[in-house]
Amino acid sequence: MPRIIPSLWFDDNLEQAMDFYASVFPDTWIHGTTRYTEGGMGEPGKVMTGDFEILGQRFNAINGGPHFKFSEATSFIIECADQAEVDYYWDKLTEGEGAESQCGGVKDRFGVSWQIVPKALYSTVTGKDPEGAKRATQAMLKMKKLIVADLEAAYRGQ
């Protein structure tokens, strides 16, 4: 069965990005790197490509230069069990030059976009009570970091 493996384009900081992700996510594996050689397109000895895995998701990446930038049009969802996990990933991914966005979105210091989503989001914004779901959705739209207690309270009408 074929697999889909996201490929990420970094300017010149792939090695730092892999180390950063390994420090943030448990069970991160760096499977290997290749380096530029004499006569190649990059500086000899610098990392050219890397293969790594975050929480079971394989990634391929290249230090391809400044030609392409990451965009919020593509993001990776981190499904969190509870508020503690939301807080952990929010804090880690926004530290340094990371940036907060709306509705659980963040951009890390490398420009990669993530959606930090508590499982409670699904049970509130798509709950069986249509009015509760509407209230929870309206609450979510006003949030940057998603707050489980606030989503649940909105769903209940509190």
Image (cartoon, grey):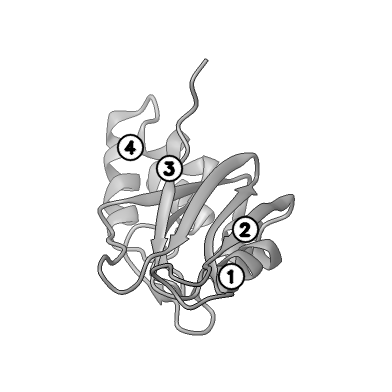
Q: How far apart are marks 2 and 3 (CA)?
A: 50 Å
Point out residue 7 in the picture as x, y percentages from the top left corner: 42, 48
> Between tags 1 and 4, which lies in front?
1
Q: Is residue 126 left or right of residue 33?
A: left
> Between tags 1 and 2, which lies in front?
2
Q: Mark 3 points at which residue?
A: 156
Q: Mark 1 points at which residue?
A: 15
Question: Reading the chain from its start, which is encountered first: label 1 or label 4?
Answer: 1
The residue nearer to you, when weighing 69 against 157, is 69
Point out residue 63 in the picture as x, y percentages from the top left corner: 44, 66
In the image, what residue occupies the spot 49% across and 59% down? 147
Residue type at the position of mark 1: Glu
> Between tags 2 and 4, which lies in front?
2
In the image, what residue occupies the spot 52% across and 53% down? 148
Question: Reading the chain from its start, which is encountered first: label 1 or label 2?
Answer: 1
Q: Is mark 2 on a helix, strand or loop?
A: strand
Count of numbered circles in the view: 4
Crowd tier of the residue under label 2, counting other residues whose Cα lies within 10 Å: few below 14, some 14–19, many 20 or above: some
In the image, what residue occupies the spot 53% across and 68% down? 37
Question: Reading the chain from its start, which is encountered first: label 2 or label 4?
Answer: 2
Q: Mark 2 points at which residue?
A: 33
Q: What element carries label 1?
A: helix
Point out residue 132 in the picture as x, y percentages from the top left corner: 34, 38
Q: How far apart are marks 4 and 3 (CA)?
A: 9 Å
